[in-house]
Structures are given as structure tokens and as C-alpha cells.
Image (tube, helix red, strand yellow):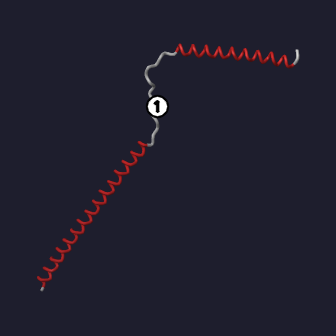
Amino acid sequence: MSDIEKAAAEAVQAAQQSEQYALLLAAVQAAQAQQQTPCHHRPVPAPQSSNTGKWVAAGVGGSVFLLAVAVSAVAVAVSAVALTVCLLVLRSVWQDIRAEREERRS
């Protein structure tokens, strides 16, 4: 037998094996398809990780923080005005008391 004849015989044998493997694979797939129970429900998709919630939370948190800072600034301003008015009234009272003392001495 020549090399060409050997190669041809091996090619024929390989083709036959390929057909056998294809049939075997088809049989296994058919058996698997029969064993599977039909599922009428759609599978629940896995929740997708989204950054939207994080951004909303950051926005809400930032807004609350800035609102707290604004209210604190208003409270400081009101306190400063009240303290200034209180000091002016006390200064006026003190000047009145000093004026009365000087009138009594003279």
C-alpha cells in the first residue's frame, strides 16, 4: 500500500468517526432535552448594580447637609443681632446710671 492509499484510508476512517461523533452528540442532546421539565415561568433577572441609587442618596445627603448649614448660619446671625441689641441696651443703662451718680455728687 502506498502512502496515498494509506492517507485516503485514514481520511475515510476519520470521516466515519466524525459522523459517529455527530450522531452521538445529537443523541445526548435529545436525551437532555427530554429530561428537562418545561418551565413556563420566566427566570427572575438578577438585580443590576446601578449607580443611580448612590447618586440619589448622595444628592439627598448633600441637600440635607447644606440645609443644616444654612439653618445654622441663620441661627448664628440671629444670635449675633440679639447679642448686639442686648449690649447696646446694657451700655445705655450703664450710661444712665453713671449720669445719675454724677448728678448726685454735684
Quadrant placement of the N terminus: top right
Residue at (65, 14) in percent of width and height = 23
Tell which of 67 and 101 is nearer to you: 67
- Front in this rendered view, residue 87 or 64: 64
- Give the image location of residue 70, x and y in percent: 31, 57
Is 80 on the left-hand or right-hand side of 20?
Answer: left
Q: Residues within 10 Å of mark 1 (few under 14, many from 20)?
A: few
- In the shown orientation, is residue 12 left or right of residue 105? right
Frontmost residue, 49 versus 104: 49
Residue furthest to the bottom in view is 106
Q: Which residue is mark 1?
A: 46
Res. 100 image quadrant: bottom left
Q: Position of residue 65 (x, y in %)?
A: 35, 52
- Residue at the right extreme? 2
- Position of 69 with respect to 12 (left or right) is left
Quadrant location of residue 7? top right
Q: Amino acid at mark 1?
A: Ala
Q: Quadrant of the C terminus?
A: bottom left
x and y percentages locating residue 42 in the rendered image: 44, 24
Looking at the image, is 96 positioned above or below residue 56?
below
Q: Residue at x 43, y 22 (%)?
A: 41
